[in-house]
């Protein structure tokens, strides 16, 4: 399950552009062991202005036709971006002390999909770790 975390993928969704379906692409952000699904943060299609909210998808189900877009290549290592470092900057345990302060980078972003909150969007805040989430990005998702 962890071999595709952080990777860009492309797959078919039958529930988009019903009844025909459509191929979408996005980044795999997280894996839920309870749901056995991956949290996908979608790319905005170049051909339309339609945007898709991040959601949990079973990438192993029939008819998905999963294709990994960024194959692992032997290439020169690059410096990680701020977004690459996000999972390592908040909520880690150091010397049995849980770090509860969120870095400025995450102030207006969902901890699950790492996308910024839109205007008039109210994130859910976890009472135990103070992380904030879109309702659909929580594990399990809340609708």
Image (tube, helix red, strand yellow):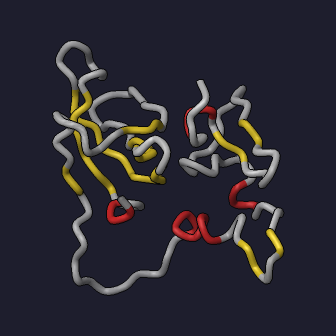
Q: Which residue appears at 33% of the width and 40% of the height?
A: 58
**Measured along the vertical axis of the image, is residue 20 above or below residue 137?**
above
Q: Seen in the image, is 113 located left or right of residue 56?
A: right
Q: Seen in the image, is 129 located left or right of residue 49?
A: right
Q: Tell me where residue 12 appears, x and y as whole percent.
A: 21, 35
Q: Which residue appears at 70% of the width and 65% of the height?
A: 90
Quadrant, the N terminus = bottom left
Q: Residue furthest front?
A: 34
Total numbered labels placed on residues in the image: 0
Residue closer to the observer: 5 or 73: 5
Quadrant, the C terminus = top right
Residue closer to the observer: 45 or 123: 123
Q: Which residue appears at 62% of the width and 44% of the height?
A: 116
Q: Tell me where residue 36 appears, x and y as whole percent.
A: 40, 45
**Measured along the vertical axis of the image, is residue 80 above or below residue 71?**
below
Q: Residue furthest top?
A: 19
**Measured along the vertical axis of the image, is residue 94 above or below residue 16?**
below
Q: Which residue appears at 62% of the width and 32% of the height?
A: 135
Q: Tell me where residue 72 appears, x and y as whole percent.
A: 25, 72
Q: Quadrant of residue 43?
A: top left
Q: Tell me where residue 59 appears, x and y as whole percent.
A: 29, 44
Q: Residue furthest bottom?
A: 76
Residue closer to the observer: 67 or 33: 33
């Amino acid at each position: 399950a962890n071999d595709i975390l952080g990777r860009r993928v492309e797959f078919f969704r039958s529930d988009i552009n019903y009844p025909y379906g459509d191929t979408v692409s996005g980044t795999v952000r997280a894996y839920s062991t309870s749901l056995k699904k991956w949290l996908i943060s979608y790319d905005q299609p170049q051909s339309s202005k339609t945007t898709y909210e991040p959601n949990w998808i079973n990438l192993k189900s029939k008819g998905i036709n999963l294709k990994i877009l960024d194959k692992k290549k032997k290439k020169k290592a690059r410096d990680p971006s701020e977004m690459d470092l996000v999972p390592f900057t908040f909520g880690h345990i150091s010397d049995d002390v849980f770090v509860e302060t969120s870095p400025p980078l995450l102030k207006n972003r969902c901890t699950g999909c790492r996308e910024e909150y839109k205007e008039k969007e109210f994130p859910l805040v976890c009472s135990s770790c103070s992380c904030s989430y879109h309702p659909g990005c929580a594990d399990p998702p809340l609708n």
